[in-house]
Image: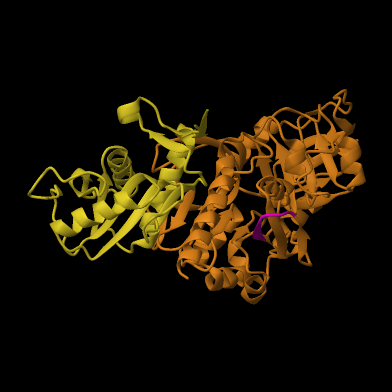
Amino acid sequence: MTKVIMDATAMQRALTRITYEIIEQNRGLENLVIIGIETRGAYLAKRIAQQIEQLEGSKLPVTNLDITNYRDDRPNTDSTNSARIKIPITGKNIVLVDDVLYTGRTIRAALDAIMDSGRPQKISLAVLIDRGHRELPIRPDFVGKNIPTSHEESIKVMVNEVDQQDQVRLNQV
Amino acid sequence: MKRYLILEDGTVFPGDAFGATINTTGGLALYTGATGYQEAITNYSYTGQILAFTYPQQGSTGINRDDYENITSALKGVVIGEDYNFTSHWHAQMTLDAFLKAQRIPGLMNVDVRRLHRHIAQYGNMKASFMDTHDEHAHDQIKALVVPNNQVSQVSTKQPYPSPNVGKNVVVLDLGLKNTVLRELSKRRCNITVLPFDASSALIETLAPDGVLISDGPGKPEALTKTIQTIKEIQGHYPIFAIGLGFAVVALANDVSVKARTVTQHRINLAVQEKITGDTDFVAQNSAFYLEQQDDLKDLLPTYLPVSAAEVVGFRHRFLPIYAVNFDPEAAAGPKDALHFFDDFIESMDAAIDRHRREY
């Protein structure tokens, strides 16, 4: 059974609020870097950066992060273990963006990947959906919506750029 | 009975009396909406004013039990073009005439409201009076009228009162509150405490609210020194959502000055654009003060701009959870495009509660 828990308007409102909260919590945006975790998180990160630009007139550095090599549930195929962050991050204030926060393992991998590329001053976490069930001591700083779920359920965030629509679905097995 | 609307500059508009047959004086306000006279007449934003409806026909749907924005009206007079003076609307409980009589508010009908509108648009806000004659004495009287400066204290609640519900705790600072603001919060399960406009920050702290709403109201924001002081003391501690006069007061509390309009705006068709998304909402507006885009807004971040003027109609504080709009998102009357502001307020309270929990 599938239930739509956020439509396009609700998604936009949540992202807008996250953008405002990022501005509110970070005095001055000069040091800010936005990093989106591939695939959906990268598009959300771009949208947040665009919104800040729309509001402040200044362009923020925004980039994607592929965490495949840092995952703990599959063997590392790339011996170099290099993260592919293309912009300098040392001393920066990073906002890491992902679509769904669940066990926290993806974020752990992303943190390792970031740490391999430099030493940021601060990393905060923005997620569109927090569905609970953490297996690591990780918590978000900016949340679009808290959705209490069971392990049997799955959350699917769809974005226009790849899924041809903005929607968040809850699938019950 | 023939009566006259006399403006401060000596212009006279003849009309026929309805409602209560008493003479009156007050500032003149023009409402341009075609609908919503009951909401406007019971809206305390017009306290002490003579309200003129520029849409030619009013009164056709009578007065019903659902559209009161307050139990009473704080108007000094009502000016309309044509009155039906009967109503066949299924919802109506009495005619506009009967309501005004019961409230002891004088009315003037068969006035050339379009000429009146053009006159005010050209010469700006004016004081006005309803008189039986339009001799020199009547003119002198209106010129000498001093409009009081304490409209908010006239209509703000004298005692705190609760509007109980189960859910978030919200404090509403009543500067001339509309029922619909409470209704929208109630729909979203807020347990509300309404406080007088001059409530202290200590009292608010005692109530430990999840958020504070500062309502719209009448008069000049500069006069509300107590409210400004309270906002200075509480901002940053709770998410604050401010509407209309609240917008102006929050700006002043952040050392940003607001300008008085030469023609106050009372309409239900203002197009405002959200800067961040480009989305447009049509909203109701009752506004005597405005912020200019070119002004030094200090720590305030413009979020909503009207499509047709160089004003700022929405801002947020750059570092603190404060959001303010210079229009009426609750509508009543008007389009309901902007009701999402109440959802945003709820979500901001959620986020603040979340953040607070994480700090422990």
Which residue sits furthest bottom? B202
Q: Which chain is orange?
A: B
Q: Viewed as shown, does residue B105 lie left or right of B212?
A: right
Can residue B146 be seen at all in this image of the molecule? no
| Residue drawn at x 41%, y 31% as measured from the top left | A166
Q: Viewed as shown, does residue B166 lie left or right of A90?
A: right
Q: Is residue B113 magenta?
A: no
In this orientation, which residue lies closer to the viewer: B28 or A107?
Answer: A107
From this view, report whether residue B248 is shown above or below residue B131.
Answer: below
Q: Which chain is yellow?
A: A
Asked where in the image residue B273 lies, by quadrant, the reply is: top left
| Residue drawn at x 20%, y 49% as measured from the top left | A70
| Residue drawn at x 43%, y 39% as measured from the top left | A12
Q: Which quadrant holds the N terminus of chain B?
A: top right
What residue range appears in magenta? B165-171
In this orientation, which residue lies closer to the viewer: A25 or B117?
Answer: A25
Q: Viewed as shown, does residue A72 lie left or right of B274?
A: left
Residue B103 position in % (x across, y down): 88, 47
Residue A48 position in % (x across, y down): 33, 45
Asked where in the image residue B269 lies, by quadrant, the reply is: top right
How many marks on residues? 0
Residue B280 position in % (x across, y down): 47, 35
Q: Is residue B166 magenta?
A: yes
Can residue B121 be seen at all in this image of the molecule? yes
